[in-house]
Image (cartoon, rainbow, N blue to C red):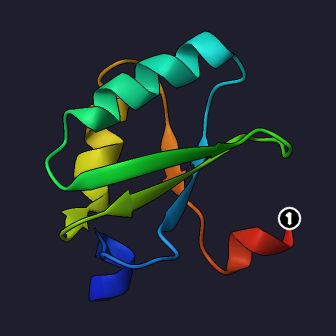
Amino acid sequence: MSYLSEYIIPATLGKTFLLGTDYSRDYQKVLKILGKIKGISRVDLNDEVFPREITIYTECPVAVKEVQQSVKAFGFHAIPKSFLLSFF
């Protein structure tokens, strides 16, 4: 694994995750969860695609594993979108 795949680095592009929920109320819960992680500055939702995607922007490097574990503790899944997943 590389540093870029293990961390969300501060950049204008952010890092996109596939989100395992369809409901807007669940998205609000995920926003609240991610808002507690130090370094996350903004979270955007793309609800025009399925599965839903969130893009996370940071002020300092944040571990992808930290994001996944925080969201999973509340029963959701956040899977980092990679180059191969963009073809599906």
Query: Where does residue 23 sit, x and y in percent of width and height?
Result: 69, 16
Question: In the rendered structure, which amino acid carries the disc numbered 1?
Answer: Phe
The residue tagged 1 is: 88
Q: Residue at x 55, y 16 (%)?
A: 26
User: In the figure, 35 relative to 63: above or below?
Assistant: above
User: In the figure, 16 relative to 2: above or below?
Assistant: above
- Among the 4 quarters of the image, the one containing residue 47: top right
Identify the element where label 1 is drawn: loop
Q: Residue at x 42, y 30 (%)?
A: 31
Q: Residue at x 47, y 69 (%)?
A: 14
Q: Is residue 37 left or right of residue 20?
A: left
Task: Inspect this view and state whether residue 55 appears.
Answer: yes
View extreme (bottom): residue:
2
Task: Inspect this view and state whether residue 1 appears.
Answer: no
View extreme (top): residue:
25
Q: Total marks drawn? A: 1
Pick the front one: 6 or 39? 39
Pick the front one: 61 or 63? 61
Pick the front one: 48 or 79? 48
Query: Where does residue 25 sit, x and y in percent of width and height?
Result: 58, 11
Q: Is residue 87 left or right of residue 59?
A: right
Tell me the quadrant of the picture where the N terminus can be found. Answer: bottom left
Query: Where does residue 78 sit, x and y in percent of width and height?
Result: 49, 44
Tell me the quadrant of the picture where the C terminus can be found. Answer: bottom right
View extreme (left): residue:
38
Q: Residue at x 84, y 46 (%)?
A: 49
User: In the figure, 71 relative to 14: above or below?
Assistant: above
Q: Residues within 10 Å of mark 1 (few under 14, many from 20)?
A: few
- Among the 4 quarters of the image, the one containing residue 57: bottom left
